[in-house]
């Protein structure tokens, strides 16, 4: 494993960094003002997207991109440091058409869409012309166990009829959102992991009601995390994604790379917080010393650097493993980073908030927004505990391989 950045990646890092500095960072105040005034996406977004595309900074997340498809084909390992740079600003990745959940949805459609589905949905997504959402979680079912999902997808002639209620559906309030990928049960009598399927539902189909955009710890996100009712929504059978009963397998396929993108961006947010904390602690003095000269603050800085480096290496290893052996072989590492990185994200940002004093919880730094998002990430794509469960189960299974050798380490007490 060699995780040093190649010449190509160093070049792309410089390009993304320069783009952020020239076009994105200066627009933070405008973004905040537009969103506060209810204008979303901000007027500059389409211009920035065209510029990023012209510069070859487009669809960088999709290793399977074909030569005729728009974007720059990179491996997960090559994309990781770029996503990290984008993660420093919560809305930056959309400029490069690299934002969740569109990325996960594009990956899914890239693998499983029929030619008609490709033309109708994937082509405009790859071009950044429309946005999409992924609708699995339900208010009345414990959705961290996908086999619990209750929404019904019933066949009626040449149509599917969808009835159910979903919530926390990210992107569904985005004015550009046209597609909902909906997970529900086509066959409640089948064995648990063959009951669900996914269907492609236009957001404007009759019977779809976007009830509300939930705030995240009272933070408003303009792209939305929405509660949606599906009341007898009808779509043609051709809108089934993959086969009937394959919903669970599709969800697994979708979440592998998707989870790693969130982690890469989180490392960027944590890195920004560490940089801000380190600078701030050299600017302010209490009790005759700069903040960094107090042991507690020095330890926050040190711990944050150590933890970020550890997490980054694990994320890079996971990206490398997905590239080399596929997402299935990297299941344990994907769960490990998903359990680790959102917690790191909030831990480092929390220290930076403390180092900033009351300003840390004000709207005058990005820290409060980044912390809130990090906290939400401990649920999104599965709560921490589910990933710990997955890691522990794999460890327990693997322990069979060394069980017999372990006995040789034991020295039972024998009375003389
Ligand atoms: C900001 C945000 C965006 C989201 N975006 C989307 C989206 O776009 N699409 C979508 O479908 N969903 C989305 N979600 C929902 C998210 O995926 C779910 O919240 C998550 O899967 C957990 O499901 P639940 O909320 O029903 O919790 P439950 O399943 O009710 O679980 C509650 C708690 O039980 C504990 N728990 C569960 N299983 C175990 C276990 N095996 N061992 C120990 N403890 C356990 C965990 O602490 C868990 O938090 C989003 C959530 C947030 C906060």
Image (cartoon, helix red, strand yellow):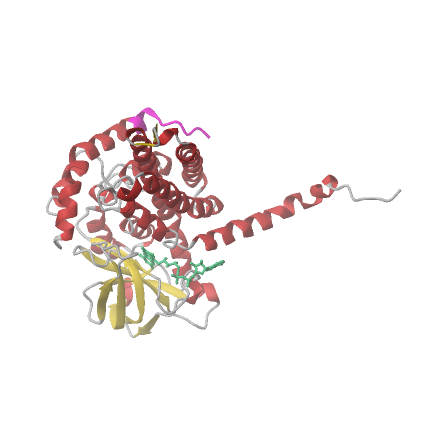
- Report the magenta residues as a range: 1-10
- Tell me what residue is drawn at x 20 percent, y 42 percent: 95
Provide residue 302's location: percent of width, then percent of height: 42, 32
Figure quarter occupied by ligand 1: bottom left
Above or below residue 365? Residue 16 is: above
Q: Can residue 74 be seen in this view?
A: no
The answer to whether residue 241 is left or right of residue 307 is left
Provide residue 240's location: percent of width, then percent of height: 31, 63
Front residue of this view, candidates 240 and 53: 53
Q: In which quarter of the image is residue 212?
A: bottom left
Q: Quadrant of residue 152?
A: bottom left
Residue farthest along the top direction in this orientation = 7
Provide residue 23's location: percent of width, then percent of height: 16, 35
Residue farthest along the left direction in this orientation = 43
- Tell me what residue is drawn at x 34 percent, y 34 percent: 78
Magenta residues, dominant SS class? loop
- Tell me what residue is drawn at x 24 percent, y 55 percent: 171
Residue farthest along the front direction in this orientation = 287
Front residue of this view, candidates 9 and 111: 9
């Amino acid at each position: 494993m060699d995780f040093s950045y190649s010449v190509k990646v160093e070049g792309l890092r410089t390009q993304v960094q320069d783009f952020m500095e020239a076009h994105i960072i200066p627009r933070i105040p405008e973004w905040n003002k537009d969103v506060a005034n209810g204008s979303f996406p901000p007027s500059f977004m389409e211009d920035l997207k065209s510029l990023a595309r012209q510069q070859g900074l487009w669809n960088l997340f999709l290793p399977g991109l074909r030569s005729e498809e728009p974007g720059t084909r990179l491996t997960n390992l090559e994309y990781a440091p770029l996503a990290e740079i984008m993660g420093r600003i919560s809305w930056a990745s959309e400029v490069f058409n690299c934002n969740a959940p569109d990325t996960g949805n594009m990956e899914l459609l890239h693998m499983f869409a029929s030619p008609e589905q490709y033309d109708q949905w994937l082509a405009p997504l790859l071009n950044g012309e429309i946005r999409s959402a992924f609708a699995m979680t339900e208010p009345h079912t414990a959705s961290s166990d996908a086999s619990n999902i209750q929404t019904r997808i019933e066949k009626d002639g040449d149509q599917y009829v969808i009835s159910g209620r979903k919530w926390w559906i990210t992107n569904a309030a985005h004015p550009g959102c046209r597609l909902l990928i909906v997970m529900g049960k086509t066959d409640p009598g089948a064995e648990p992991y063959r009951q669900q399927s996914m269907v492609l539902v236009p957001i404007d189909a009759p019977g779809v009601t976007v009830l509300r955009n939930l705030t995240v710890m009272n933070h408003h996100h303009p792209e939305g995390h929405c509660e949606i009712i599906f009341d007898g929504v009808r779509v043609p059978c051709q809108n089934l994604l993959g086969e009937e009963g394959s919903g669970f397998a599709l969800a697994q396929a979708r979440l592998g790379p998707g989870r790693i993108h969130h982690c890469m961006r989180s490392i960027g947010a944590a890195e920004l917080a560490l940089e801000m904390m380190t600078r701030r602690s050299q600017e302010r003095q209490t009790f005759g010393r700069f903040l960094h000269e107090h042991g507690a603050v020095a330890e926050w800085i040190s711990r944050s650097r150590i933890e970020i480096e550890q997490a980054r290496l694990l994320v890079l290893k996971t990206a490398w493993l997905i590239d080399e052996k596929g997402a299935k072989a990297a299941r344990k590492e994907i769960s490990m980073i998903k359990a680790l990185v959102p917690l790191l994200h909030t831990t480092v940002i929390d220290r930076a908030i403390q180092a900033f004093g009351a300003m840390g919880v004000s709207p005058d730094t990005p820290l409060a927004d980044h912390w809130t998002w990090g906290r939400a990430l401990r649920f999104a794509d599965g709560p921490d505990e589910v990933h710990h469960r997955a890691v522990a189960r794999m460890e327990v299974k693997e322990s069979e391989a060394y069980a017999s050798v372990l006995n040789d380490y034991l020295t039972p007490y024998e009375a003389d």
